[in-house]
Amino acid sequence: MRRASGPPMIGRLHEREAIDRLLASVHDGLAGVLVLTGDAGVGKSRLLEYAAENAQDLTVVQLVGVEAETWLGYGALYRLLRPHLGLLPALPQRQSDALNAAFGLTDAALSDRHLVGLAALTLLSHAAAATPMLCLVDDVQWLDRESAETLAFVGRRLYADCLGLLFAGRDGGGPDVFGALPALRVEGLADAEARALLSAGVSGHLDQAVAERIVVGTGGNPLALLELAVNLGPEQLAGVTALPEPLPVNRQLEVHFRQTAASLPADTQTLLLLMASTPTDDQAALWRAAGALGLSARSAIPAVDAGILIRRTSLAFRHPLIRSAVHAAAPTEEHRRVQAALAATSAPERRPWHRAEAADGPDDSVAAELEAASELAQARGGYSEQALVLTRAAEMTVHPGKRAERYLNAATAHLASGNLAQVRALIELATPDLAGPEARVHAIRLRASVEMIRSRPREVPAMLLDAMADLRTTDPMACWALLREAVQAAIIGGRMITGTTPHEVAKTAADAWRDSDFPLSSPYPLTAALARCIAYGYAEGAPSLAAALARLRAAEELREPDAFSVMISIAGDELWDIDAKRELLEKLVAAGRGRGALYGLSLALLALAKVEIWDGRFAAAESCYNESDGYLAATGYFRSGDFHKILLYAWTGQEAELRAAADTMRAMSRENGTGVTYRWAGQALSIFEIGSGRYQEALDAQLDMFDDPPVALGDMNLAGMVEAGLRAGDPRAAAMAMERLEERAPLAGTPWALGLLARCRALMSEGDEAEQLYKESIAHLEKVPVAVELAWSRLLFGEWLRRRKRRADARVQLRAAYESFESWGAAPFAERARVELQATGETARRRTVGTQFDLTAQERHVAALAASGLTNTEIATRLFVTTSTIEFHLSKVFRKLGITSRKQIEDKLSEADLGDRPQPGP
């Protein structure tokens, strides 16, 4: 049969330019990432070949996804990195351990999958240090999920690493993890280019009308054009006889390849199926199984002659679509025979899967082997592999109840991997055969977890209370675990939950709580204390809350279970305990960095940003927000979006951004039932309106949150409500807030609480005693890192003094307030203080805000870390990037700051008044 040696590169100017830009970027010492998508046969693989042909002076590494290996966690990643594993000793120990554990090379402890991603990134960066590298990954739809997620993570964290990643995959196939990367959809060739390609493939006469019909009928699909050029008869090409209907394109093209393979000898077909069932780079496994089947290399000759296989360094399918067609078309019995051969010759960890594929029906012994194999996958962090193996184990299980249990365990593994769609699908499969309360509760808890991960707590508390009823008498600890999750969901959902109320959930939890011997780091006592506050009032709950925070502060290390950072943040706010809040959140940040737990780290950074804001450290808060957003993007979770910066927008007076964020958060709250986001929006709006002197608008926002009992931010808004109520002419509203503050602040007993209480007493006072109360407020607030509250009290005190005609005294307070607000960029309050200061006869000098040397947020953050004494490797590890990226950022920092040494960074940062500081590391 006639077969072209390879399709010529005709057209594709846009695609080639994109690839050329990627190659140029890698040559320039930077990085490049591109994902090519499109229909089968449209030319993606040929574009990868083009990249390889033009990768001058680059080391080219290639990987092809294999359909039969999609279940093997980290299998594709191992094949890609295997030539470079000798560099593992050069990696930081945690990263080296993470890769060794993922590949099953050592007994190292399981690591977070994002630490595996950082390790892969660092290893590839080290490999590219000597010679820039280009990684070409074809058929990404057939990558196992762990490998796909890791490579997508690497792609999102590349910056200045002399490394290029070029992916290619079919539309809508495989793990949906590459969406955040730059992508280019490859379409069919333009008509003129398609005709040129067709003509190049036809050796005889080609009728122009026939050519037009073929071009239109194939949509310019290059593979279809070349196949038709070879397989149509001379009479058909010359227009003497009719063309086949339909023309082989897309699915029909796959049918064409199936038919071609089906015409080959039986032993050749078996060899093709075996090749389609083994990785392209594992020739040893291929020929071991071939020997068990009685096949030899001679069996490949007819496939080579037919153009199905080509000879490169080893035998390979001419096109990835042929591999898929062969695998899909083979009869079931032939699949079983090939899988039995693979089971007999494969490594022990792969044998159970092949045995299951070779079985002709349920088999409990095979199911038990699969279940044992799934534990090995879990130990390596291969949660998707574990889920797929457990799903196969369930399918092989005879007993319905045991089958349902395995389906639920598979769903749990999918939950750990973030594959929420599969969690729901497996729950549905398991539900009809659930046996006993434990299984039913397991299913409900999984459903609740999916809802919480999707930030939809509306129905979760009621779901978990129903589940708890089944376990109340059989398993008290499991019952409490459900209640902890229900309380968290109720706090986050607030008044928007359905089927129950926060008070009912909290009372159930508080009544069920038994103070057992939990470790200091356990989240249970804190959850119980929050429940007691909601159910039985502040007087009952505050002591428990203070004890729970003290207990956590005594723990050496904390972890981020579920929404722990959110609960710690709310608990700290309830007691106005900024010191505990900062300390505990910094512990969570350090732990998240150390383990590579980027999702938990992201949440902790979002909470820590607010702590920085209350201390007037707006640049540090911005750094937390940007770092968190980067991690959320890198991990493939939702991008936090600018709405999370709403409190910063309020203080800095960015009104348009503030109102847009508030609209977004309130819409999210209504749609998903997240009452806490509604309250966060209201808090930010009220602060901005008070700073801007629009007290009625501020009061409206406050009253909208003044529910009974308050669930989150119930305390943080009280002082603002007192001020807004008095200034808006609504003393009743002010009195309502004051009554609650009078009750709670003394019970909290923290300097922040007592400082706000004294401030509000001063506002409510009509006589000279206000002066002493303002001084008392300032004295308390000077003891804790809440600089914006201190400046706020000075502003109010200065306003009071000015109205008493004590201009000289007023200037002292107003000047201090103005200088603080102005230096932070707190525009609304700075303007309010400036106007008051002018009224005393002093002209406030506006600070000239420099450009901060034009450093980007990332450059400021890296500079601050370098100034703190961290090495480039330590900075890279903390920020989940490579040392090359850190070196690149620091070179720009040095140039922009006009310095030549890291020792000079700190002075320059102070001169620029960046207000940043490094966050805690591991």
Image: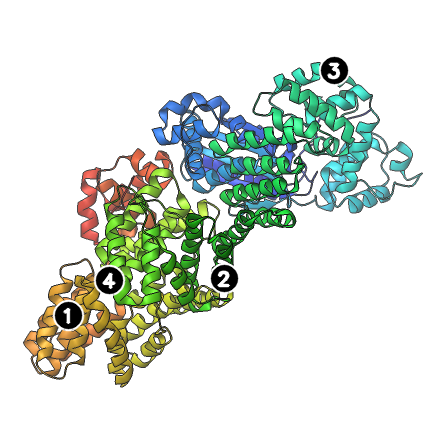
| SS at circle 2 | helix
In the picture provided, is 484 more to the left or to the right than 918? right
Q: Residues within 10 Å of mark 1 (few under 14, many from 20)?
A: many
Counting from the top left corner in percent of width and height, residue 840 is at: 11, 78
Nearest to the eye among marks 3 and 4: give it.
4
Q: How many marks?
A: 4
Nearest to the eye among marks 1 and 4: give it.
4
Q: CA distance from mark 3 to mark 4?
A: 76 Å
**Mark identifier at residue 295:** 3
Q: Quadrant of the N terminus?
A: top right
Q: CA distance from mark 1 to mark 3?
A: 88 Å
Residue sitting at x 86%, y 40%? 207
Residue sitting at x 15%, y 77%? 762
Sequence-earlier tag: 4 or 2: 2
| SS at circle 4 | loop
Residue sitting at x 19%, y 69%? 756
Residue that mark 4 sits on: 576
In the picture provided, is 49 more to the left or to the right than 679? right
Nearest to the eye among marks 4 and 2: give it.
2
Q: Is residue 14 visible?
A: yes
Q: Amino acid at mark 3?
A: Leu
Counting from the top left corner in percent of width and height, residue 727 is at: 25, 82
Q: Check if mark 2's residue and mark 1's residue have beta carbons within 8 Å.
A: no
Q: CA distance from mark 4 to mark 2?
A: 30 Å
Q: Amino acid at mark 1?
A: Arg
Q: Amino acid at mark 2?
A: Ala
**Mark identifier at residue 462:** 2
